[in-house]
Amino acid sequence: MQLYDIFLQHPIITTDSRNCPENSLFFALKGENFDANAFALSALEKGCAFAVVDEKEYAVDNRFILVDDVLKTLQQLAHFHRQQMDIPVLGITGTNGKTTTKELITAVLREKFNILSTQGNLNNHIGVPLTLLQLKPEHQLAVIEMGANHPGEIDQLCQIAAPNYGLITNVGKAHLEGFGSFEGVMRTKGELYDYVFRHGKKIFIDKNNNFLREMAFSAGFSTSERIIEYGLNIPNKEPAAISGEILENSVFLKMNCHTPEGTFIVETRLIGAYNAENILAAIAVGSFFGVENNAIQRGIENYIPQNNRSQLTITQKNKLIVDAYNANPSSMSAAIKNFARMEGEPKTLIIGDMLELGKQSEEEHRNIILLLQQNGFKNVLLVGSQFQKVNDNYRTFQNVEDLIKYLESSPLQGQNILIKGSRGIHLEKVLPFL
């Protein structure tokens, strides 16, 4: 309780000794290559009021708070603080689209409520507690994104955030190196359903996704009373609370959407039919919490994607669809299929390796090569060692620097270009050369 009292007096948290706002509270976290205990004194000298450390030698005066484990203390403090705020907390996870869905839901809910929402991708065992510690009495709802690449991590984040509501966007082949298999992905993501069933209220679920329905049933959600459904192209004989149809997908996605309140058309700034379910998820959450259709429509239409997530960029030379924030087999396949359907020629694809796939990496990269061929793509530039192992059809580069050298000597002009790859490939570096 003593630490919580200190936090209430000094509610600005920092874990970076280079960024120490006046009267903030410094948590000396350990990383693979650093021990922030060694920087605790420096943090105090730069403006922090207190420093939380877990090595006795650094606690030299009463400005240091000595604990057994700084990370666990941060997580426990965040959980205790969240418990003091009697507000709905929505936990969001999924293989693909969780950040976009979180941003859309936030945009919709902000039309009516004061919202705390995960910033950027602060969705792990450090980012979630840092987000929760920003909760203030004036907040009416919290939207917390949860990421994972190993079993048990979603459950750990649920223990910290205590979500009342849960939404899993989808499940697919990602982080297989950590999860071991697709079944491992399902079990880990499903930990959100498990927690909400035991401790919370309701889940929001894509009615068309059989994997999610199976996971919900396994968690105990056997009746519709605790499930809010949404879905694309739902037949009238199988009504969902929220449904919709794609009207246009030439560049930006345009949809017809149905809620209990009525029907409306939404013209988004999102690229890709694969975003339709993300939009419907946001509508479902907004409708459930009483946001009116015109406000839902406004929130979605005003949302502009950032951070290289399905962004349209028009340069002096080319039209770019930049989706280089992350990639796995399911998101890569969806992006390629969507690009094949889009209007506009000629088309070029710059595709980077999909990382963290473990033993299945070679097979999954070979599947992507096959998909590119099946869709008739001729102009394809592949980047990364994994594609080099399996490619006999397209021009391949060891890394993005080699690709840049090629583009400097053979510039692309007048092209519609899809740029898609895992973050570790750094395809964003190629943008100035297009």
Image: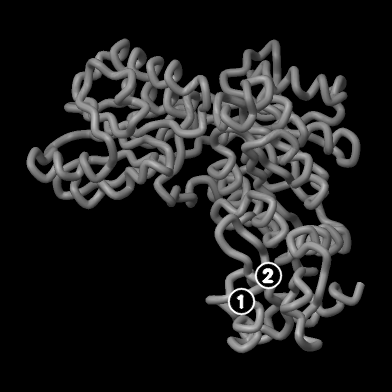
- Number of disc labels: 2
Left or right of 45: which side holds 308? left
Image position of 286 with respect to 216: above or below = below
Image position of 51 with respect to 312: above or below = below
The circle on residue 313 is none
Q: Quadrant of the C terminus?
A: top left
Left or right of 66: which side holds 170? left
> Crowding near pointer 2: few (<14 within 10 Å), some, many (20+)?
many
Q: Position of residue 176 (x, y in %)?
A: 57, 27
Q: Quadrant of the N terminus?
A: bottom right
Q: Position of residue 289 (x, y in %)?
A: 75, 46
Q: Residue at x 64, y 72 (%)?
A: 14
Residue at image mark 1: 39
Task: Please state which of residues 17 and 189 is positioned toward the viewer in this rendering.
Answer: 17
Instruction: Looking at the image, tell me whether mark 2 or mark 1 is earlier in sequence order.
Output: 2
Task: Tell me where residue 398 sits by quadrant.
Answer: top left
Q: Is residue 12 at all visible to an observer of this figure?
A: yes
Q: Secondary structure at mark 2?
A: loop
Give the CA distance from mark 2 to mark 1: 8 Å
Mark 1 is on which residue type? Phe
2 and 1 marks in contact (CB < 8 Å): yes
Residue at image mark 2: 28
Left or right of 413: which side holds 143? right
Mark 2 is on which residue type? Ala
Q: Residue at x 40, y 28 (%)?
A: 335
